[in-house]
Image (cartoon, helix red, strand yellow):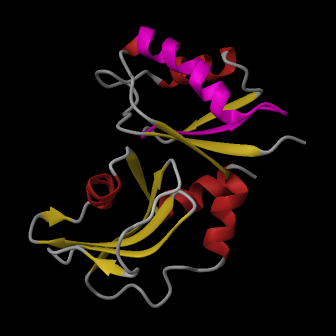
Amino acid sequence: MSTVFVVFYRNMNLGHQNSPDRAALEDALREAGASFVRSFQTNGTVLVKVGDEDPREVVDRAAPRLTAVSGYKDAAIVRPVDHLETILDRNPFAGSTDERTYRETFTFFDGDHDFGAPVPWTNRRGDVDIIEFSQGVALSVIRKTGSRVGNPTAELEARLGVPATTRTAGTIRRLLKASR
Protein backbone atom coordinates (compact mmCIF):
# COMPACT_ATOMS: atom_id res chain seq x y z
CA MET A 1 0.00 0.00 0.00
CA SER A 2 1.43 3.37 -0.96
CA THR A 3 1.79 6.26 1.44
CA VAL A 4 -0.62 9.18 1.19
CA PHE A 5 0.97 12.60 0.87
CA VAL A 6 -0.42 16.11 0.96
CA VAL A 7 0.67 18.78 -1.47
CA PHE A 8 0.24 22.27 -0.07
CA TYR A 9 0.32 24.77 -2.94
CA ARG A 10 1.18 28.33 -1.97
CA ASN A 11 -1.17 31.10 -3.12
CA MET A 12 -3.43 28.77 -5.09
CA ASN A 13 -7.15 29.47 -5.22
CA LEU A 14 -8.84 27.02 -7.57
CA GLY A 15 -10.61 28.63 -10.50
CA HIS A 16 -9.18 32.11 -9.89
CA GLN A 17 -6.69 34.00 -12.03
CA ASN A 18 -3.27 32.28 -12.18
CA SER A 19 -4.67 29.15 -10.51
CA PRO A 20 -5.98 26.02 -12.19
CA ASP A 21 -9.48 24.71 -11.71
CA ARG A 22 -9.90 21.45 -9.76
CA ALA A 23 -9.94 19.21 -12.85
CA ALA A 24 -6.78 20.76 -14.32
CA LEU A 25 -4.94 20.45 -10.99
CA GLU A 26 -5.90 16.81 -10.51
CA ASP A 27 -5.19 15.95 -14.17
CA ALA A 28 -1.72 17.51 -14.02
CA LEU A 29 -0.78 15.42 -10.99
CA ARG A 30 -2.22 12.22 -12.51
CA GLU A 31 -0.37 12.80 -15.77
CA ALA A 32 2.81 13.38 -13.77
CA GLY A 33 2.49 9.92 -12.17
CA ALA A 34 0.20 10.11 -9.15
CA SER A 35 -1.96 6.99 -8.81
CA PHE A 36 -4.53 8.79 -6.66
CA VAL A 37 -5.36 12.50 -6.53
CA ARG A 38 -8.01 14.32 -4.53
CA SER A 39 -8.11 18.08 -4.34
CA PHE A 40 -9.31 19.10 -0.91
CA GLN A 41 -11.10 22.44 -0.55
CA THR A 42 -10.18 25.24 -2.97
CA ASN A 43 -6.96 26.44 -1.39
CA GLY A 44 -4.47 24.22 -3.22
CA THR A 45 -4.43 21.35 -0.74
CA VAL A 46 -4.25 17.97 -2.51
CA LEU A 47 -4.06 14.37 -1.31
CA VAL A 48 -1.88 12.16 -3.54
CA LYS A 49 -0.51 8.63 -3.72
CA VAL A 50 2.55 8.02 -5.87
CA GLY A 51 3.46 4.38 -5.31
CA ASP A 52 7.21 3.98 -4.78
CA GLU A 53 8.09 7.24 -6.49
CA ASP A 54 9.32 10.36 -4.72
CA PRO A 55 6.22 12.60 -4.39
CA ARG A 56 8.36 15.71 -4.90
CA GLU A 57 9.31 14.46 -8.38
CA VAL A 58 5.65 13.96 -9.30
CA VAL A 59 4.78 17.48 -8.10
CA ASP A 60 7.75 18.92 -10.00
CA ARG A 61 6.70 17.14 -13.21
CA ALA A 62 3.15 18.53 -12.84
CA ALA A 63 4.38 22.13 -12.44
CA PRO A 64 4.90 22.97 -16.15
CA ARG A 65 1.39 21.76 -16.98
CA LEU A 66 -0.10 23.91 -14.21
CA THR A 67 1.77 26.92 -15.58
CA ALA A 68 0.63 26.16 -19.13
CA VAL A 69 -3.07 25.74 -18.28
CA SER A 70 -3.43 28.50 -15.70
CA GLY A 71 -0.28 30.54 -15.24
CA TYR A 72 0.30 29.07 -11.76
CA LYS A 73 3.98 28.96 -10.80
CA ASP A 74 4.35 29.22 -7.06
CA ALA A 75 5.72 26.87 -4.41
CA ALA A 76 4.37 23.41 -3.58
CA ILE A 77 5.28 21.77 -0.29
CA VAL A 78 4.82 18.02 0.21
CA ARG A 79 4.27 16.24 3.52
CA PRO A 80 3.25 12.67 4.42
CA VAL A 81 -0.21 12.46 5.97
CA ASP A 82 1.27 10.29 8.74
CA HIS A 83 3.52 13.17 9.84
CA LEU A 84 0.52 15.49 10.21
CA GLU A 85 -1.39 12.85 12.13
CA THR A 86 1.53 12.39 14.52
CA ILE A 87 1.58 16.12 15.21
CA LEU A 88 -2.16 16.34 15.89
CA ASP A 89 -2.12 13.20 18.04
CA ARG A 90 0.11 15.11 20.49
CA ASN A 91 -2.59 17.81 20.89
CA PRO A 92 0.07 20.51 20.41
CA PHE A 93 -2.25 23.49 20.83
CA ALA A 94 -3.41 22.48 24.32
CA GLY A 95 -2.53 25.22 26.76
CA SER A 96 -1.56 27.68 24.00
CA THR A 97 -4.95 29.16 23.24
CA ASP A 98 -7.07 31.64 25.15
CA GLU A 99 -10.07 33.89 24.62
CA ARG A 100 -8.07 36.01 22.15
CA THR A 101 -7.29 33.05 19.85
CA TYR A 102 -8.58 33.42 16.29
CA ARG A 103 -7.06 30.29 14.71
CA GLU A 104 -4.60 27.49 15.33
CA THR A 105 -2.40 27.05 12.27
CA PHE A 106 0.20 24.91 10.52
CA THR A 107 2.69 26.74 8.31
CA PHE A 108 4.74 24.60 5.92
CA PHE A 109 8.10 25.39 4.32
CA ASP A 110 10.91 23.41 2.73
CA GLY A 111 14.41 23.05 4.07
CA ASP A 112 16.10 22.64 7.41
CA HIS A 113 15.98 26.10 8.94
CA ASP A 114 16.79 27.55 12.32
CA PHE A 115 14.06 29.85 13.59
CA GLY A 116 16.68 32.15 15.10
CA ALA A 117 14.81 32.82 18.35
CA PRO A 118 13.53 30.78 21.28
CA VAL A 119 10.14 29.14 20.71
CA PRO A 120 7.47 29.85 21.82
CA TRP A 121 7.85 33.24 20.17
CA THR A 122 5.43 36.15 19.72
CA ASN A 123 5.67 38.78 17.00
CA ARG A 124 5.80 42.51 17.82
CA ARG A 125 2.08 43.07 17.18
CA GLY A 126 1.19 40.20 19.50
CA ASP A 127 -1.05 38.55 16.91
CA VAL A 128 1.15 35.53 16.04
CA ASP A 129 2.55 33.05 18.55
CA ILE A 130 4.85 30.41 17.06
CA ILE A 131 4.47 27.56 19.56
CA GLU A 132 6.49 24.84 17.74
CA PHE A 133 9.04 24.89 14.96
CA SER A 134 10.59 21.74 13.44
CA GLN A 135 10.81 19.51 10.37
CA GLY A 136 9.45 22.06 7.90
CA VAL A 137 6.38 23.03 9.91
CA ALA A 138 5.63 25.79 12.38
CA LEU A 139 2.58 25.58 14.61
CA SER A 140 1.05 28.93 15.50
CA VAL A 141 -1.79 30.53 17.36
CA ILE A 142 -3.04 33.67 15.66
CA ARG A 143 -5.15 36.49 17.00
CA LYS A 144 -7.35 39.12 15.46
CA THR A 145 -6.67 42.67 16.64
CA GLY A 146 -9.25 45.09 15.33
CA SER A 147 -9.77 44.12 11.71
CA ARG A 148 -6.28 42.68 11.32
CA VAL A 149 -5.53 38.95 11.65
CA GLY A 150 -2.06 37.65 12.46
CA ASN A 151 -0.16 36.23 9.48
CA PRO A 152 2.22 33.38 10.30
CA THR A 153 3.09 32.93 6.62
CA ALA A 154 4.45 36.46 6.36
CA GLU A 155 6.29 36.16 9.69
CA LEU A 156 8.00 32.91 8.68
CA GLU A 157 8.82 33.98 5.13
CA ALA A 158 10.47 37.14 6.49
CA ARG A 159 12.48 35.20 9.09
CA LEU A 160 13.46 32.23 6.93
CA GLY A 161 13.68 33.77 3.46
CA VAL A 162 11.78 30.86 1.86
CA PRO A 163 8.22 30.41 0.58
CA ALA A 164 5.71 29.15 3.13
CA THR A 165 2.01 28.38 3.18
CA THR A 166 -0.44 28.13 6.06
CA ARG A 167 -3.51 26.01 6.77
CA THR A 168 -5.73 26.05 9.84
CA ALA A 169 -5.65 23.14 12.26
CA GLY A 170 -9.30 22.59 11.38
CA THR A 171 -8.35 22.10 7.72
CA ILE A 172 -5.63 19.63 8.73
CA ARG A 173 -8.09 17.68 10.90
CA ARG A 174 -10.65 17.49 8.06
CA LEU A 175 -7.89 16.54 5.63
CA LEU A 176 -6.82 13.63 7.82
CA LYS A 177 -10.39 12.34 7.99
CA ALA A 178 -10.65 12.57 4.19
CA SER A 179 -7.38 10.65 3.74
CA ARG A 180 -8.68 7.53 5.49
Let me know if residue 77 is in the magenta part: no
Q: Residue at x 61, y 17 (%)?
A: 27
Relative horizontal placement of residue 97, taking residue 61 as reference (left or right): left
User: How far across and down, in percent of the image, does residue 84 sit?
Assistant: 63, 61
Q: Residue at x 50, y 13 (%)?
A: 64
Q: Is residue 108 above or below residue 91?
A: above
User: How far across and down, in percent of the image, does residue 92 sit?
Assistant: 54, 79
Q: Is residue 1 above or below residue 66?
A: below
The answer to which quarter of the image holds residue 13 is top left
Quick one: which residue is furthest to the right in this view?
A: 1
User: How far across and down, in percent of the image, does residue 117 sit?
Assistant: 35, 75
What residue span does the magenta drawing correspond to? 43-69
> In front: 17, or 57?
57
Q: Residue at x 23, y 65 (%)?
A: 150
Q: Is residue 47 above or below residue 31?
A: below
Tag count in the figure? 0
Quadrant in which the N terminus appears: top right
> In front: 33, or 174?
33
User: How far across and down, in percent of the image, does residue 167 sit?
Assistant: 43, 55
